[in-house]
Amino acid sequence: MCFHYNSLFLERRLVSVWAPVLQLTIIVSQVKPGQITKYSCCFFPFLLQIWDTAGQERFRSVTHAYYRDAHALLLLYDITSKSSFDNIRAWLTEIHEYAQSDVVIMLLGNKADMSSDRAIRRDEGERLAREYSVPFMETSAKTGVNVELAFTAVAKELKHRAVQHPNEPKFQIHEYIEAQKEKSGCCSYF
Ligand SMILES: Nc1nc2c(ncn2[C@@H]2O[C@H](COP(=O)(O)OP(=O)(O)OP(=O)(O)O)[C@@H](O)[C@H]2O)c(=O)[nH]1
């Protein structure tokens, strides 16, 4: 189960990438209008349920219930908005209190296509991620840069946890992301 809060980002991943390739049926239900959307999509042998919650502080009390049992959380901030970046610390504190202790967390700086309006440098995102020992990358829901990678990395981590064989080396999500970024030459997109 994943969670994050950028509708465009999520829909791009689900509708443009997974649905045609994996022939998924995506069930979208608006749990609370304007606040939480639930997407369910089946691909054997996993059921991935993704909850897209509102990021604003005023909805935070409502969202605990949705991420308490989540296996992974994708936290997005907007690289053009300092307040959205500052909000991430509050989310990380909340998550520490309410989420499962082994939850997979990923920090994403979205709107990387808007670097001329950038308010948060990439290294500030990297530093925050290091502080909390979580993987980090910049994404663009508009151009699609790193959207695929963010979801794939989390899905792989969850899959390895679920079906890890004793002799298999542990999946290293940080290493996987760095290797994939290098392969795709990600940063030249920005
Ligand atoms: N240029 C650009 N615009 C984006 C990107 N992601 C989202 N947007 C725009 O930002 C606005 C907000 O997008 P949403 O997907 O509704 O954001 P949200 O975070 O789900 O909003 P909440 O309802 O607060 O959770 C829309 O106008 C999107 O088109 C991006 O990567 N690049």
Image (tube, helix red, strand yellow):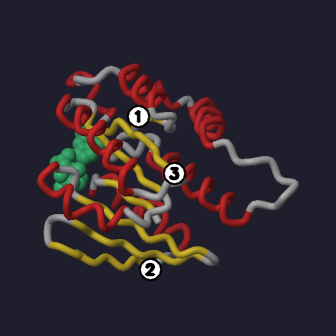
**Looking at the image, which residue is at 19% across and 59% down?**
61
Q: CA distance from mark 2 to mark 1?
A: 28 Å
Residue 90 tag number: none
Query: What residue is shown with label 1?
Result: 138
Residue 142 visible in the current orientation: no
Question: Measured from the top left, where is residue 41 in percent x and y?
Answer: 46, 75
Number of marks drawn: 3
Q: Front-most of 84 and 89?
A: 89
Tell me: residue 130, above or below residue 47.
Answer: above
- Relative to 97, residue 127 above or below: above
Residue hosting label 3: 104
Q: Judge: label 3 CB < 8 Å from ligand 1.
A: no
Q: Amino acid at mark 3?
A: Val
At x 26%, y 33%, the residue is: 85
Instruction: Name the one closer to the observer, 36 or 65.
Output: 65
Q: Residues within 10 Å of mark 2 (few under 14, many from 20)?
A: some
The answer to whether 84 appears left or right of 100 in the picture is left
Residue position for label 2: 25
Direction from residue 179 to residue 135 in the image, left or right? left
Secondary structure beneath disc 1? Answer: strand
Q: Quadrant of residue 66?
A: bottom left
In terms of sequence position, does the residue under pointer 2 or pointer 1 come before the other?
Answer: 2
Work out whether residue 61 can be spotted. Answer: yes
Q: Can you tell which of label 1 and label 3 is closer to the viewer?
A: 3
In the picture as drawn, the residue positioned furthest to the front comes out as 97
What percent of the width, then of the height, locates residue 138?
40, 34
